[in-house]
Structures are given as C-alpha cells and as structure tokens.
Amino acid sequence: MIFRDQLTYAFGNLRKTRLRTFLTAAGVATGIGAMSSMVSVGLGTQRTVIQAFNEGNILTSIMVHTGGDRNEDLPIDSLPTLDSTTTESLRSLPGVRDAFPRLTIAGMLRYGEEQFFRSLEGMPARVLMEQLERGSVEMIAGRPYAANDSNVIVLSESAAERLVADSGDIASLLGQELSFLAATAPGALLGSDSAGLQSALPGGFPTEALPRSLMAFPFAGMIRNLETGLFLPTSLELEVVGIAKGGGSLNDFVGMSLWVPVETVEPLHSQTFQDLESILTGDVGDRGYPVVQVLATDVIAVRSVQDTIQAMGFAAESILDEIDQVRRGFMFMNSMLGSIGGVSLFVAAMMIVNTLVMAVLERTREIGLLKSMGATDGDVMRLFLTEAGVIGVLGGVGGLTLGYVVARITNMFANMQFARVGEVAVDLVAFTPLLMTGGMAFALIVSLLAGYYPARRAAKVEPVVALRHF
C-alpha cells in the first residue's frame, strides 16, 4: 500500500470518530502549546538579558579598584592609587578601548518646590555618545552634553517626571538650572580647630549627654561632626541640556539616573562623604578614584586585560566570572519550563493510546478483511501508525499556534507591569524556527510512540478470528 493510500485511509477513519479525534488532537495541542509557550518565554528572556548585556558594555566591562585578595593585608597608604595618571595608563593597555573613573556623589536634587535624594553620576561625554549610538540610551528631549560642557546635566525620563510633578511637561526643564546639594567635609577643616563653625544642629548636640557605651563606638565621630558643623551642604548649580531614557530593559533600571560630565563631579568628589567609614571618622581626603571602568575591545580580550590589571596590583572584576553560571541558570529554567509542558504531553500520549486501542477493538472485522485481501502485518501496522501521526501533526500545528498566542498574551501582561514602573516595553517571546521545528517533531514522535502498541496489537489480529465478528 502506497503512502498516499495510507493517508486517505487514515483521514477517512479519523473522520468517522471526529469528536474522539478532536479531543485527542486537542490533548496533544495542549501539551505542545504549554511546552512551546513556556520555552519561548524562557528563550526570549535569555535573549533580552544577553542583548542588554551587550548594549550596556557589560560583557566587555572590567571594574578596577584597589584592595582585593592580592593586597588586602597591606596598609592603605601602600596600595596603588587610582587617579587620572593611572586611568591614562589603563587606557593605553593592549586590548583596551577606553577607561574612565566611576564617580558618584550622594545628595539632594532641587528644582522649585520639588526635591528628592539621588546620586549624581559622572559620565564622560564620549561614553554617553557611545550609549546613544548603541541604542542603549535614547534622547527624548534636548541633547547630550559635549566634551567641553561644564555644569550641565542630563536627566533620565523618570527623574524629569519627578521634578515637574503634576505639570507633566518634562521638556520645560530644558535650559533650567537645578541645584544639587551634597554633604561635604572640607579637608582644610578636618582635624583642625572648628570652634568658629556654626553647629549643624540647632543649639548644638552635647556629646557628654550620650551614654558612655555609645561614645565608645566610632558613632561618636559622627556625632562630633554633627556638633562641630563639619557636615556642610555644598550646592552645585547644573543646567539641564537633555532628557533621556533607557533603550533596553535593563537600562535606567532604577529609574532616577542623573548624568553629568566627570569633570564636573571630580573636584567635589574628594570632599564628600562616600561611605559609612568616612561619615563615622570624618576623614574623606583624596584617596583617588574608588572605581575605574575599563572597556575591552571585545569579549575575547577581557581575560588578558583583566590579568594585566591584576599584575599591576589592582583588583579587577568582570562579568565573565559569572556568565557560565547565568547560562546554566537559563538552561535549568528552560528545562523546567519544558518539563511542565512535557507532563501535559504525556497525558496526551495516553489519550492517543486509548483512542487507537479503541479503534483496534472497533475495527477488528475491518482488520480481518484487509488481511484476507492480502494486507500484511506491516501494512496494518503502518495504517494505524499513520493515524497516530496525523493526530500528532494536527496536535502539533494547533499546539504551536496555541503556544504562540499564550506567549504573546504573557508578554503583553509583562509589558503592562513594566509600564506601571516606568520601564520600556520588551519582547520576551522567542518563537525561533528551531523551536517550531522541534515542537512539530516532538509531537509527531510522541504520537508515533504512543501509537506503536495499538498498531502492533492490530497487526497481531488473526484474520480467521477477526472474520468471525461478521
């Protein structure tokens, strides 16, 4: 019997039991739909994360700082310093395309009656331009600052909306001046006679009123700083030249980015309290940059650049140390999602077995007649396997359609949640050709495996016994 006759015969038999065939194919479609939708969302999430890594220079970025396993036992004064000279040296290393300090100042941003606490981030103009070219940052109003600009600021969309409050006209901020207040500790006053300074607290704060147990801790240093007025607010006036938003799902994740030229924050950076230690001791000083970000030319060069920097006495960290764990995590997640869909597909396989076993019992006389007319055991077995394959193909097509619709609905609801927190819309669905081909192949293979036992049972029917049913 040729394959075309087998298909015609299979479709004819399946049409006789349309409801049973529909329910069985629907079971296969449910399993394939659950598996394909979950795996596609998992693959889409992985694609979005990796794409954000690439756009944000995360894969080629190396964070350089003092300290680390190599020199943590050395005195602070003997550690190598990260300064402008060191940054230029790092920029000239083979495999490095850029290096710049990561400077942030915690403080309060003011505009009219609106104010909120945030960190001011120093970003070189060339780095900001690169982010714009890559599409990881998008200007929605104004322009990015240039290399020769000073005392200018680019706000994130979320920060701009916070400042304009109810008016909603973020473009009105362009050309306006904002005040950024930071707590400074002028080095000339640290450790000197500061009796002439006005107390930072009304009426002063008598340290002798504190319990002795509390004064024994470094917290007393902060109390003395408050008492002597060494927490001095310094205002930085900044002109708004642009408003930007993240071009990817992981950009501007915190929602309140404030970007200024590095040259604007660098003079103030050495005079501000940066961590708990400096607050408790009142010692800020100029210890150089806390972190320098080095950008390698490509991912392949990251490891050699990292080793070179560590040989210079600095600690160097890159995302490559964690990439393998991230990939394993995504593989595990996709496997778990696929397994959940596999449970539904297993149930569908049992439905196929039940459907075809019932067909064998109902068509015993038909099988006997076919064998009496010369059909071999192989012919009968192929007929039932063809019916199982047709059910699998119908279920696979329906399942992939169902899976795509479910994945799109899931992506729509996810983007609705992103919109509520000010994030940009992303595409979390990755219905790749490999996934569709694999889904169809899996549905067909499961159906054929499920149909093997009923087909073999049909092939073993004796013609003489089958003809007795007439």
Image (cartoon, helix red, strand yellow):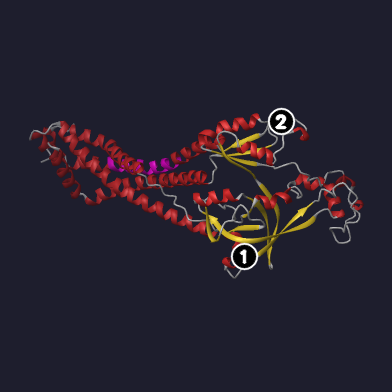
Residue range in magenta is 336-353
**Circle 1: element type:** loop
Q: Position of residue 300 (x, y in %)?
A: 51, 33
Residue tagged by mark 2? 71
Q: Label 2: how many residues lie within 10 Å, few (<14), some (14-19) or many (20+)?
A: some
User: Residue 376 lies in magenta, yes or no?
Assistant: no
Q: Is residue 432 left or right of residue 249?
A: left
Q: Nearer the viewer, residue 385 or 266?
A: 266
Residue tagged by mark 1? 175
> Which of the two discs, 2 and 1, sits closer to the camera?
1
Name the residue type under label 1: Gly
User: Residue 347 lies in magenta, yes or no?
Assistant: yes
The answer for how far apart the CA atoms under marks 2 and 1 are is 47 Å
Number of marks drawn: 2
Q: Quadrant of residue 375?
A: top left
Q: Position of residue 311 (x, y in %)?
A: 64, 29
Q: Is residue 365 left or right of residue 253?
A: left
Q: Which residue lies at the image location 44% right of the left edge and 53% below the top edge?
A: 411
Name the residue type under label 2: Asn
Q: Label 1: how many residues lie within 10 Å, few (<14), some (14-19) or many (20+)?
A: some
Q: Quadrant of the C terminus?
A: top left
Q: Position of residue 421 (x, y in %)?
A: 55, 58
Q: Nearer the viewer, residue 431 or 85?
A: 85
Q: Which residue lies at the image location 92% right of the left edge and 51% below the top edge?
A: 208
Q: Which residue lies at the image location 18% right of the left edge and 33% below the top edge?
A: 459
Instruction: Say which label, 2 or 1, has the lower sequence index.
Output: 2
Q: Quadrant of residue 358?
A: top left
Say whether marks 2 and 1 touch (CB < 8 Å): no
Q: Quadrant of the N terminus?
A: top left
Q: Is residue 467 left or right of residue 432?
A: left
